[in-house]
Amino acid sequence: MNVNEISKEDIDDLRKACKISSQALEYGKNLIKKDVYLFDIAESVDKKIINLGGEIAFPSQISMDDLAAHFCPTKNNNPILENQVVKLDVGAHINGFIGDNACTVDLSKENQELVKASRDALNNAIKIIKPGTTLGEIGKTIQETITGYGFAPVRNLSGHGLGKFQVHTSPTIPNYDNKDSTKLKQGDVFAIEPFATNGEGIVIETSNPGVFALANKKPVRDTTTRTILKHIEKYNGLPFAKSWLEKKFPSFKVNFALKRLSNAGIITEYPPLSEREKGIVSQAEHTILVEENKAIALTKND
Ligand code: MN
Ligand code: MN
């Protein structure tokens, strides 16, 4: 998305969504403490977005230790916080215009440098951006910052463009120097999200997805699946949590329908992503706007 191609009202919605996203992230960050259940945090953050006047762009995700992203707790898969490294990823939208941001809290107190590495990488990337900066240069800055701390960037996770009701569009913002010579333009809006790890820097899919999105609407025959699909359509194609459906339908029906819909290619599953060597992972993320001669983080609280 480029703000020069949307209306003044749309830009206001985008700015408001980004502000709410950052306030909800800050709120959630303060809930990350020992002896708290992940499900309670996710629910509180989702509620906070609504109370601030936004809508949920994607379910709040709380991924611990070697899980880099996409962990969405449910009532039956609800870990408790102890000494983990915890990533919180939060997004609000207004009329489809999305703010996306994330942070890491180190409850172990042994991974402060790892947390700093991804945060510094994000800040350094923002500093070099102006119209004409290439995607490869952003990746190079992220990579050099993270390797400067002695860690590895996660190469198969990346930042992304944001569209109306679309959390992931082009361009792909690399977390390493992939030599992409595509130049940024004034008005471009996208998320940058460096991940740093003490593992090798590759994530793989695990099992038990808790987050899904409608991919390709097709008719389905059985009544349960059809009823649940009807409900899923209300999310406008944005990602949704299994736990949201479990508030409306019994768990066994939700599991049945999600499996069917996934097998039919109607929904996409987003299973938790784990670092391949079980390295600990940190993440930082902001939604960025390219201005005349610099970039600003729309999700930065001031
Ligand atoms: Mn995010
Ligand atoms: Mn993102």
Image: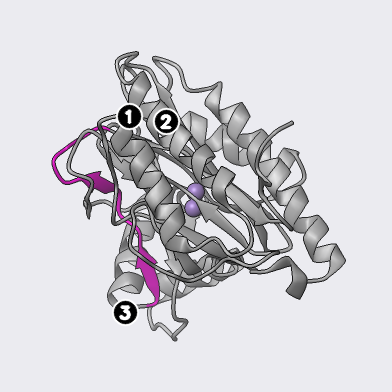
Residue 107 is situated, as x and y percent measured from the top left of the image, at 37, 17
Residue 125 is situated, as x and y percent measured from the top left of the image, at 50, 46
The quadrant of the rendering that contains the C terminus is top right
Residue 5 is situated, as x and y percent measured from the top left of the image, at 74, 75
- Looking at the image, do the residues carrying marks 1 and 3 touch, with CB atoms under 8 Å apart? no
- The response on whether ligand 1 sits within 8 Å of label 1 is no
Identify the amino acid type marked 2: Leu
User: Residue lying furthest right in this view?
Assistant: 8
Q: Which residue is mark 3?
A: 264
- In the image, residue 7 above or below residue 30: below
The quadrant of the rendering that contains the N terminus is bottom right
Q: Which residue is mark 1?
A: 79
Residue 168 in the figure: left or right of residue 276: right
- Picture quadrant of residue 27: top right
Q: Which residue is mark 2?
A: 38
Residue 152 in the figure: left or right of residue 253: left
- The response on whether ligand 2 sits within 8 Å of label 3 is no
- In the image, residue 265 above or below residue 238: below
Residue 87 is situated, as x and y percent measured from the top left of the image, at 41, 34
Residue 242 in the figure: left or right of residue 48: left
- In the image, residue 154 above or below residue 167: above
